[in-house]
Amino acid sequence: MSTKPLDYDNQIVRWWVISGIVWGIAAMLVGVIIAFQMVYPNLNFPPYLTFGRLRPVHTNGIIFGFTLSIITASMYYAFPRLLKTEIFSKTLSRIHFWLYQLTIVLAVVTLLGGITQSKEYHELEWPIDLLIVVWWVIFAINIFGTIWKRQEKRLYVAIWFFSSMLIGVAMLYIVNGLVMPVSFWKSYSIYAGITDANIQWWYGHNAVAFVLTYPILGMMYFYLPKHTRLPIFSHRVSIVHFWGLIFVYMWAGPHHLLYSAVPNWLQTLGMLFSLMLIAPSWGGMLNGFMTLTQAKEKLRTDATLKFMLVAITFYGMSTFEGPMMSIRSVNVIAHNTDWVIGHVHSGGLGWVAGMCFAAIYYLVPRLWNTKLYSEKLAELHFWVATIGILLYIVSMWVSGVTEGLMWRAVDETGALMYPNWVEIVQQLAPYRLIRAIGGTLFLSGVLIMVYNVAMTIKNAGAGFEYVDLREGVKVA
């Protein structure tokens, strides 16, 4: 074995961290704007800055701009270290980065221009789809090439979770993206009717799995033991967690199509697999909690650990709430209401963004070889973000249940009590305003983090120093 020090190529990780922060701010700002547009319609400025054009910019920006950038940063950081080897190709990693940036820019321009396939999470038209396939293949070659040349025989579970994203997304994206182009910026799906809906929600549900769940769990299994300097509570549970999710998650998509033309047996199958998801999800959540209990003395003072605690908590809440919402008697109230928005954002803001913030706070001091500028600002970010999340999801829960009940309320003659839809919208306005305020608070927390990160980077090269944040432990 060579004794030459390994070059972990921190430069490419730095680029991805900055990419995640930049696209995250942009996408969250758009989210705040459309939240206020729901309350004040006059804030829509057609044709480009309307809710319909901005919403896919927000969703794609958060999922593929912010989250995927931090996931990729984590993978380029974790794989060489876990596998005791250098990344397979520095050249491929840079080609991957710039093609990805080109894709995000094209996505923003085309979506604002109204060029879209009109499929949730798969709005981009076919030329951009092909561009995504190119850099996804490059990404996969670089990651699997690194696994192939590894010096560490065993594959830690974080590797499994991260790698599953590369395979799962490729399969989903290709199948759901099969279209017939009719011009350079217009195409139609090769599927029709209920088959198209089924394929779309098989993709949509599993996009949540393979982008917003598996790689984020990979981050939990990597950063939690690294930050606490303690082993994961149970490697056996982590493996069961991985294979349990892989087996069950794929078949739960039909729960998005309850009360539709999809065959009844398929709707029931989707509901049952959704309920089965609770078991592996909570196994993983408990594994995370049990690992955290080994470092409980740091929880009061360590903002990074607090973000992990909140993230794991929201992971548990979301993976319980989602299956409950797939039950027909619950879904009849929840479907198409603000409750769904609250559910999505409890997972998105609490679980996904929480773990991404923890990753940023872990990575930035190490990548720029310095100390974090301010632990107090990180603490302030945590509390502002947490209050913002709570305002957001509680208001959406109340709004959603109110909305669902008003839609179905009938008088003694059996007629709808609220046949005028605008009347229901007006009733929901106060809750949606609270949601917008919660989103603004969450964005304010991110801006605090950005200032903290910028000041940390400004002091680059001062030397990274591990700080033990346990109460009563003096800094050396």
Image (cartoon, rainbow, N blue to C red):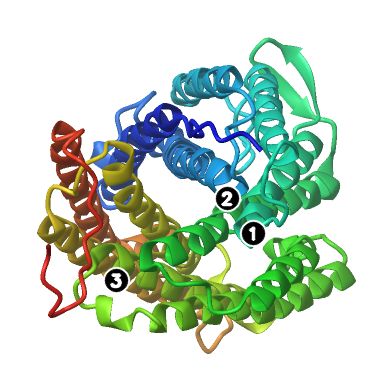
Q: Residue at x 45, y 20 (%)?
A: 105
Q: Is residue 375 left or right of residue 79?
A: left
Mark nearer the viewer, 3 or 2:
2
Residue 347 in sight here? yes
Label number found at residue 156: 1
Residue plotted at (68% across, 62% down): 256
Q: Label 2, label 1: how many angstroms apart (C-alpha)?
A: 7 Å
**Depth check, front residue: 210 or 274:** 210
Indicate which disc, 2 or 1, sits on the residue closer to the N terminus: 2
The residue to which callout 3 is attached is: 390
Counting residues from the start of the chain, the first of labels 1 and 3 encountered is 1
- In-front residue for pair 17/274: 17
> Where is residue 88 shown, x and y percent of the image?
64, 28
Q: Quadrant of the N terminus?
A: top right
**CA separation in Å, label 3 and label 2:** 36 Å
The residue under label 1 is which amino acid type?
A: Tyr
| Quarter of image, res 239 | bottom right
First in sequence, mark 3 or 2: give its number: 2
Q: Closer to us: mark 1 or mark 3?
A: 1
Q: Are marks 2 and 1 in contact (CB under 8 Å)?
A: yes
Q: Circle 3: is it few (<14), some (14-19), or many (20+) Cα within 10 Å?
A: some
Query: How many residues crowd mark 1 within 10 Å: few (<14), some (14–19), many (20+)?
Result: some
**Residue type beneath disc 3:** Leu
In the image as oriented, which residue stretches furthest toward the top? 184
322 horizontally vs 178: left or right = left
Q: Residue at x 62, y 80 (%)?
A: 283
The secondary structure type at the circle numbered 3 is: helix
> Which disc, if any, is residue 82?
2
| Quadrant into which the C terminus falls | bottom left
Q: Residue 405 vs residue 156: left or right?
A: left
* Amino acid bearing label 2: Leu
